[in-house]
Image (tube, rainbow, N blue to C red):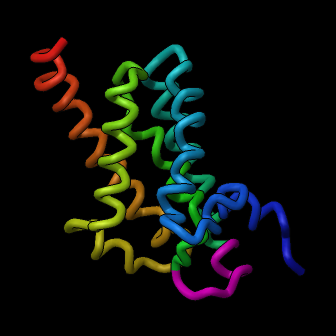
């Protein structure tokens, strides 16, 4: 029996069903999540929230993968993208430049899958679906911190 809630959350309320760039479309749901996480009063609470989102994404993506029956990590499953996007902003102010940079670099690293991302994606189930997005988010976070600390002050 199909669980409509699993499919709804896993596909980003249908954004993952977009015929054009479903992963990028689905990642958009991560923006309000990131804003909500940024409102938490401490970095520790923000990290805790990001960890919880990522851990929720693992069983959700695993269940959706089984339910949809479209093979390993089908493109319509985007909970891994939107649940990991808030990681890109940890310890940074939620400004337009930081927001755009985190989003763009998260997508670049998720799409291109530089090492070790590609190798870890071979893990099975929800862990394999989410791990590449988690690492892409960490790489985007590192770039965001570099930009915020080195590049943006030159223009601000």
Image height check: is 85 above or below 151?
below
How many marks the image carries: the answer is 0
User: Residue 112, relative to residue 94: is it above or below?
Assistant: below
Q: Quadrant of the N terminus?
A: bottom right
Residue at 52 percent of width and 34 percent of height: 34
Q: Residue furthest front?
A: 20
Give the image location of residue 134, x and y in percent: 40, 54
Between 38 and 102, which is closer to the camera in this rendering? 102
The residue at 56%/53% (across/down) is 55
> Can you give x and y, in whole percent of width and height, for residue 139 in the image?
26, 48
Image side of residue 109 versus residue 39, left or right: left
Range of magenta residues: 64-72
Horizontal arrangement in the rendering, residue 63 relative to residue 19 (left or right): right
Q: Residue at x 29, y 45 (%)?
A: 140
Is 51 left or right of 112, judged from the image as shown?
right
The residue under the point 49% across, 28% down is 46
- From what the image shows, is residue 29 above or below residue 67? above
- Of residues 16 and 62, the one drawn nearer to the viewer in this rendering: 16
Measuring from the top left, give residue 74's x and y in whole percent: 55, 78
Residue 127 percent across, percent down from the top left: 49, 68
The C terminus is located in which quarter? Answer: top left
* Magenta highlight on residue 116: no
Quarter of image, res 94: top left
| Residue closer to the observer: 49 or 145 | 145
């Amino acid at each position: 029996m199909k669980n409509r809630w699993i499919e709804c959350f896993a596909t980003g309320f249908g954004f993952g069903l977009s015929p054009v760039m479903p992963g990028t479309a689905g990642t958009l749901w991560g923006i309000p999540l990131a804003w909500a996480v940024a409102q938490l009063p401490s970095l520790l609470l923000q990290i805790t929230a990001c960890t919880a989102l990522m851990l929720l994404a693992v069983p959700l993506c695993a269940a959706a993968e089984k339910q949809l029956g479209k093979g390993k990590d089908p493109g319509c499953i985007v909970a891994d993208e939107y649940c990991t996007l808030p990681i890109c902003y940890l310890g940074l102010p939620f400004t337009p430049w930081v927001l755009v940079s985190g989003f763009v670099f998260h997508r670049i690293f998720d799409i291109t899958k530089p090492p070790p991302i590609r190798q870890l994606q071979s893990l099975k189930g929800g862990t394999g679906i989410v791990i590449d997005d988690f690492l892409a988010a960490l790489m985007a976070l590192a770039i965001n911190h570099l930009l915020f600390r080195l590049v943006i002050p030159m223009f601000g």
